[in-house]
Amino acid sequence: MSTHASFRPLAICTAVTALFALSALFAALPAHSQTIAPTATPPDTAQGTPAREYHIAPAGLDSALNQFAEASGIQIVYASALVSGRHSAGFSGRADPASALAELLRGTGLRAVRGQNAAFLLEPEPAPADLGGAGRELPAVKVTDRLVSEQNDPTVASAALKSNVPLTRTPQSVSVIERQQMDEQNVQSVAQALRYSAGIVPETRGIGDRYDSLQMRGFGGFGGNAVYVSFLDGLNLGRGLSYAVPQIEQYGLQRIEVLRGPSSILYGQANPGGVVVLESKRPEADHVNEVMLGAGTHDRWEGAFDLGGALDADKRVLYRFVGLARDNDTQVNGTKEQRIYVAPSLTLRPDANTELTLLASYQYDPNNGYYGFLPRYGTVSYNPNGQIGTGFNDGEPDYDHFRREQTTLGYAFTHRFNDTWTVRQNTRYMHMWSDYQTVYSSGYTSSANRYLNRLTTASLEHLDAFSTDTQAQADFQTGAVRHAVLMGLDYQMTMADRRLASGKAPALDIAAPVYGQTLAMPALASYTRQRTDDLGLYAQDQMTLGKWSFVLGAREDYASTSANEYVKHTSSYQFDRAFTWRAGVLYAFDNGVSPFASFSRSFQPVTSGTTASGSPLKPSTGRQFEVGLKYQMPGTTSFTTLSLYDLDQNNVSTPAPNNASYRVQTGAVRSRGVEVETHLNVTRDLSLIAAYSYTSAWVASANDTSLGHTPAAVPKQTASLWADYTLHRGTLKGLGMGAGIRYIGSSYGAADDSFKVGSYTLVDLALHYDLRNWRFAVNASNLFDRQYVAACASSTQCFWGVRREVIGTARYQW
């Protein structure tokens, strides 16, 4: 509920963090067993047992051995004291049981020897002088498929439960987009990386791609209602009051995870349709260095590098340095995009149980392209004065500009106290500023539909955002149930200021535009400073009982916003609190099929508008039921998810019945849908990514013309297919081709459903060739140069889609 109570987030944050540290030091649970037996049938003989796929996350050795015994059906015997305090790095990949067990024990100082009845016995590794004497140790590891770390495994999610958990054990619809997929498709933004994912409609602003905005499960929008990609390394990036919205360079990312549906239990205030969590590239001991040069359409030139590795022989100090520079025009006349990006990082591993990674980035966008829009008539609908071209600029090329600079500095810390307790803390500070001035259209001056009415706006904004997330995780067992209990506290503080000016500009003839007309300096309309504080306390228990997986979590959030407006001399304060929770269940059959069901809630503060009494508005809330099936083909990383969901958003702000200047919270939006997504490795040479989404969304309650209608820019159906065929043997080894097709169904162009934006189908193509250390590639998006309108927000705001773009790249790796 909304109230004017106050709270002290920094004090609470400090106190709870201290409690977590004390609990980690003094509440460790002892090891629980000496013999681990499989929960099903008696063990088969390890020797000769066929290879299979394993996904065992890093954990205390005792916990890792439990997971291995259940997955393999092999009995392991050891003394509790022998494994106490030891940690396993885990193992993901395809191997026979003996080889997989050897990988689990790597670096622990222990080895497995064969005992009677096909069991394995654990014992300390012999001193170097004794090697070869026993003659009983495991054979050399022979992994039949490449080892896959959790950071590079598309079947393991790290963001959904804030720990590395196989998708087959995660009762939620989740997609993982790996670096390899981004490189194959040569994506130029995070939004482009989401093109082949189910349940998402990216690039709704078409050629205006300075932000990564999207629609998820029917929720999103434009302007103040826009949903942006806003989570990096598990922390909220924050956003300014208008145009100071960060955009993360995709070349600096290792992977992207899409969490569909309400995710407030771990991430706080969020869009009910879901969240997209980005993961930065981090140091690796055996890093493959890369330099890249590229050129393409619209005079595009770019260069990038990705360097890293170990700085010492013991691989305790690792580094990575990523950088990129890009310069290109766009399809809109008189516009340009430029970017400079660098991201150094350093990892310190003083011992086997402690890791600290320092992360920093700097990004400067001197020019950031086009962000305008055009009327319905001349784009979607017929205009007797002619169609407006896809390169038409409704602004003033010599006047318009958008500059943005963003700097981040943070760290990720992990320490394992013993087999039970692990603590983690992720922290980041970000500073950014944006300088924006533009002339933009606001419809036609008359029904003749020839002259564009134009306005000016100018905005200078600054944003400082501090985020931290402190976690304590306990891995233990009660009877036959394994628990991974996560307790956390996250806190975010943002300070934003904005100087906003507005005015009028001369009309523009769409048939014969004349630029360079005299413009009056826009007048200062507002000067606002705002501070927000968000504090969340959460707890979650992941429970595993044989083939059953359960998740139960709850969270309490406290959010305050204070603002001062210095032109109108007003101030405001708002305090909200919200309780959210979720529950999920999944059963993993031996054949790879895993049915699941879940329920989850979310919340979002509403900071604009008041009630007739002047009271602030309560947060909107989300509620979702989801059921589905997951299937991972045994022995492969091929993965398919089918989900059906029922999603509601309530407490939505809508105009008051008797006075539209005020708001009431009787609004509601409903969304029902079906999604299927598959990542399939057909052969060693051929891989497929396919997705289909059916979304039925409508405004269930409102006091305006949106009642009963589908929100703008929400297509009922979308589908996509991407295939890559690469030769791995023979004379043409290294030669490959990728091709994709994307279908976006028709959508409504206004809140009252007064007109429709037509469907469109786009084709993408990639040709690539690996030759020794080189990789040469040519990628074409919208290969057949389809002219289309991506979406409309209203009858005066329609967005042309991106026409054909061709980019060639050369990468040298060593």
Image (tube, rainbow, N blue to C red):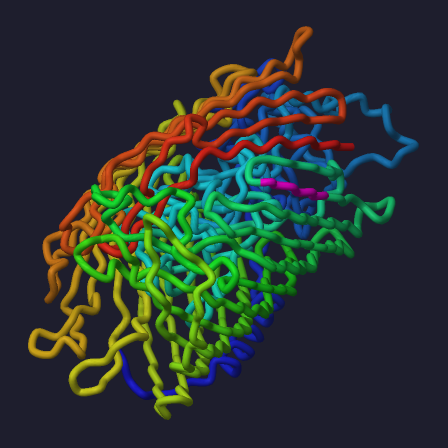
The image position of residue 243, as x and y in percent, is 45, 66
Seen in the picture, residue 225 relative to 156 is either above or below; the reply is below
Magenta stretch: give its range. 299-305
In the picture, which quadrant includes the C terminus?
top right
Residue 386, relative to residue 226: is it above or below? Answer: above
Left or right of 198? Residue 349 is right
Which residue is depicted at the point 70% across and 32% down? 811
Between residue 562 and residue 682, name the one nearer to us. Answer: 562
* Image quadrant in which the N terminus is located: bottom left
Mainly helix, strand or loop, the magenta region? strand
* Farthest right residue in view: 129
Residue 223 in the image: state x and y as whole percent.
34, 62
How many numbered marks are there? 0
Q: Is residue 304 part of the magenta span, yes or no?
A: yes
Instruction: Tell me, yes or no, if residue 484 can be seen here.
Output: no
- In the image, what residue occupies the spot 35% across and 68% down? 455
**Where does residue 651 sit, x and y in percent of width and height?**
20, 67
Identify the residue at the far left of this view.
658
In the rendered image, residue 578, in percent from the top left (x then y), is placed at 31, 71
**From this viewpoint, which residue is outermost toward the top?**
731
Residue drawn at (44%, 58%) of the image = 515
Instruction: Report the side of 584 relative to 701 (left or right).
Output: right
Q: Nearer the viewer, residue 66 or 77?
A: 66
